[in-house]
Amino acid sequence: MSELDGLWKVERVKGLLPPLLGVRKRIDGARGETTVGRFPGVSFDVEGRQLRYRAPLLGLVDVLEPEPGGFRGSARFLGREYAQFRLRPLGLRAAGRARETGMETSETDEATDEPEDRTEPEHEPDEPDPSPWAKTSSGDI
């Protein structure tokens, strides 16, 4: 199993890429595809940490480097960088590989891509609410 195997969320960092809402990369061994929502994907071959796109996108290559929480990517056309992005694990295999290689997982739920619920009570249940909007003992605000 490759360190890249699994389902990855793509996040734009900078450069000539539009917002990448709904963009995913699914990697399985030496092959993968980039998808947007439910549309058909664009195929690529995996060579080490390089994703080399097939026709009709020949010449496009994503070069990946590990970073905490996933990978940092450099999108290149004919060897020249035009954008940067991040890959964050979504699928269980990608998240497992990220943990095995010492990378932290992202702060999203791997199955639903929803933020984790990290809310904590603002005060202890037996203590009065310290909020400035809390009612005073006389009922005034």
Image: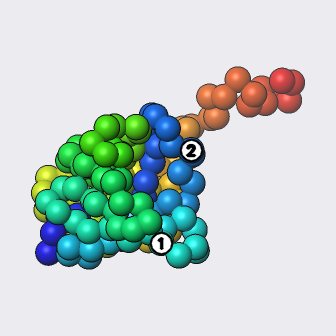
Give how far across and how far down residue 67 sits, in percent: 23, 43
Q: Residue at x 14, y 60 (%)?
A: 48
Give how far across and how far down residue 33 sits, in percent: 38, 70
Q: Earlier in the sequence, mark 1 or mark 2?
A: 2
Which amino acid lies under the numbered mark 1 shown in the image of this protein? Gly
Q: Residue at x 27, y 59 (%)?
A: 51
In-front residue for pair 69/131: 69
Q: Quadrant of residue 136?
A: top right
In-front residue for pair 100/136: 100
Taking 112 as reference, is 125 above or below it? above
Left or right, 109 with respect to 18, comes to left
Query: What is the CA distance from the residue labelled 1 to the residue labelled 2?
Result: 17 Å
The label on residue 61 is none
The label on residue 41 is 1
Which amino acid lies under the numbered mark 2 shown in the image of this protein? Pro
In-front residue for pair 91/63: 63
Name the residue carrying label 2: 18
Taking 140 as reference, is 86 above or below it? below
